[in-house]
Image (cartoon, helix red, strand yellow):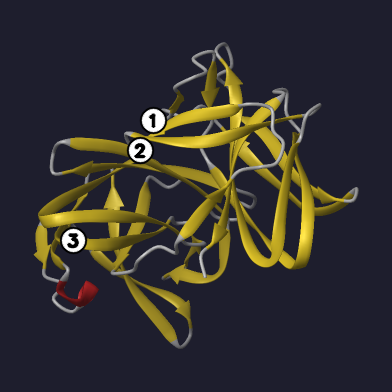
Amino acid sequence: MTGIILAALLCGQISSVKSASEVTIKIQTSQAESYHLVTKAQPLTVTAQGPTWLRVYTRIPWPAEDKGVKGYKLIMQENDVKEKFVTFETERSKVARLGSTRLSKWRSFYINVPPGENMYRFILWTAPADSVLLKFAYESPAQWSDIVPAEYGEKLQAVEDEKIINYYETTRSKPIMLEITGPQKLKIISRLAYAMDMNNEQVYSIVVKENSRIVKNSTFRAYRSETTSYQNRPDVVPSNPHSFYVNVKKGKHRFEITVGGSGTESAGLRCLVKQK
């Protein structure tokens, strides 16, 4: 595979990218961006010098005339030691193209690169067109702080990337009650609760209400997580995570947050506010 030196990219943080091919996609008539093409037969290897943050932008070629939501999955290997799945859902972009091929909207994730030289290999697991496009940038993630709901069903201790992350259970009969003072930006991460005998894809909604008025209603497609489990609830399997945001207006608010639209009865929620 061809070695591509990206001296200008990431202000010198990435030292090399081993990619079979690099393509230029059109975002608008006045804008173009370079992405690296990854297929099952052609993984992508990146060498980055830390400590730094690396943001990975992804897109997929869009199946002709298809609409709705599509999912895709990558395997990321770190220094030939660690391996994790990275999964996304996306929609067709109205502006991005690769030649005559329509592309998806971008989805991204962050890598916390430790000190020294580190190698990351990206392998395509599955995608509608058996290919994915990757772009890299030196960007730090926004800082968020967890907040604990005033009322919830049960605290769920999720094991994510060797860390314990607290989620809070919401059910149809016992919603989460969240008290918050605005103006704030609220981020809600949800994981549908799978019973041990559930395996199929599920569709569910997270509904945020205030004084019986719907503030936000977000619908997601879920499947069993392959990398996350609940330490204190071995009888429940969390789904892949989904995030959405609520702009909280000035003043005190009490939100009721519940799950709906699926055969399952509960979901784990993580609520965060953006640090100022």
In the drawing, does residue 20 fall left or right of residue 26? left
Secondary structure type for disc 1:
loop
Rendering quarter of residue 53: bottom left
Estimate how packed mark 1 is, as few (under 14), some (14 to 19) or many (20 or more) residues with alpha carbons within 10 Å: some
In the drawing, does residue 96 fall left or right of residue 184? left
Q: Residue at x 19, y 44 (%)?
A: 78
Seen from this angle, which residue lies furthest right? 212
Residue type (three-letter) at the residue carrying disc 1:
Thr
Q: How many marks?
A: 3
Estimate how packed mark 2 is, as few (under 14), some (14 to 19) or many (20 or more) residues with alpha carbons within 10 Å: some
Residue 227's spot in the image, x, y percent?
39, 30
Q: Residue at x 43, y 47 (%)?
A: 129
Secondary structure type for disc 2:
strand
The residue beneath circle 2 is 85
Residue 258's spot in the image, x, y percent?
75, 38
In the drawing, does residue 176 fall left or right of residue 62? right
The residue beneath circle 1 is 227
Rendering quarter of residue 14: bottom left
Q: Determine whether label 1 and label 2 are within 8 Å by CB.
A: yes
Residue type (three-letter) at the residue carrying disc 2:
Phe
Please tell me whether residue 242 is drawn above or below residue 1 in the rendered image: above
Estimate how packed mark 3 is, as few (under 14), some (14 to 19) or many (20 or more) residues with alpha carbons within 10 Å: some
Viewer can see residue 136: yes
Foreground: disc 1 or disc 2: 1
Q: Earlier in the sequence, mark 3 or mark 2?
A: 3
Q: Determine whether label 1 and label 3 are within 8 Å by CB.
A: no
156 and 200: which one is in front? 156
The residue beneath circle 3 is 51
Q: Earlier in the sequence, mark 1 or mark 3?
A: 3
